[in-house]
Amino acid sequence: MTNEEFIESLRHDQKTGNTWCDFHPLMKLLFCMSIGFMTMIVFKWQYGVVAFLLGTVLTATTPYLKTYLKTLGVMFLLGCVFTIVVRIYVHMGDEGAVAFYLFGKAVPVSAVISCLDLVFMIEGFLGIFMAFFLTTPTRNLCYCLEQIGMSATASFMFLSTFACIASVKEKLNAVRESQRARGIETEGNLFLKLKSILPVLFPVIISSMTGIEDKTLAMSARAFGVNKKNTALRTIAPATVAEKIIGFGTLTICIVATVLGKIYL
């Protein structure tokens, strides 16, 4: 392969062969936003279950299912369980049909349904957006946003947010490996992992921020912020007719489902 052929191969989006991963970023974002915000607006457990199952099915077709389930499991334990306990405690003793008794006090059915609505709304909303972010390279999304008129500054801010998270994650993994090489126990339950990471979390974040000046100089050297149209090495092919139908069709269905859900549920 010549140098010209190699550079030309980088100009176009690299396909993975997976339908969901190769879906156009903007149409995929429209698809996930429609379902996610429908779940949040209606705020009923039925919609949350549908969003969660849809996100799980889509991610199951990709290599990211394990990460998807692990992250949602952690979010469920950290957020949903605490919320369930608080909600049940607040509604204990309220009037209405009794679901069960806890510590001698009646827990009404309405409290249980309220907990289910909140839990599945959180899981469904996070699940469908995780199905998007796990399978969509951030730079591809930024390229698409710039193509439809978003400024390069806003696109860079969006991209740098995720790049910073990835940088902190890499540094934490490096610290964990160095601790393991010194014989410090880093594997085990969640408490043990937090115990090994928390002491170095703040220094890692600070060290990640020390490179801001270097990034600023590098951006200035590349004429970032000049009021002219920016060019990019890579280009994203426009969305196909089928992708547009799926994206806008999902938006239409979700609008109708949201109206019906607010009326009848």
Image (cartoon, grey):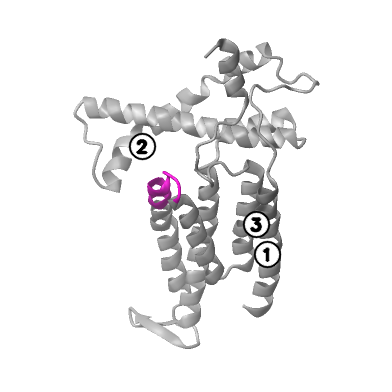
Task: For label 2, count other residues whose C-alpha is less than 10 Å away and answer few (under 14), some (14-19) or many (20+).
Answer: few
Judging by the rendered image, the residue that carries numbered circle 3 is 34
Name the element at disc 2: helix
Q: Residue at x 46, y 63 (%)?
A: 83
Q: CA distance from mark 3 to mark 2?
A: 37 Å
Name the element at disc 3: helix
Name the element at disc 1: helix
The answer to whether marks 1 and 3 mark residues whose Cβ atoms lie closer than 8 Å is: yes
Q: Is residue 173 left or right of residue 232?
A: left
Tell which circle, 1 or 2, labels the residue nearer the N-terminal end: 2
Which numbered marker is on residue 253? 1
Q: Residue at x 42, y 57 (%)?
A: 76
The answer to whether marks 1 and 2 mark residues whose Cβ atoms lie closer than 8 Å is: no
Tell which circle, 3 or 2, labels the residue nearer the N-terminal end: 3
How many numbered discs, if any? Answer: 3
From the viewer's side, name the closer residue of 171 and 104. 171
Q: CA distance from mark 1 to mark 3?
A: 9 Å
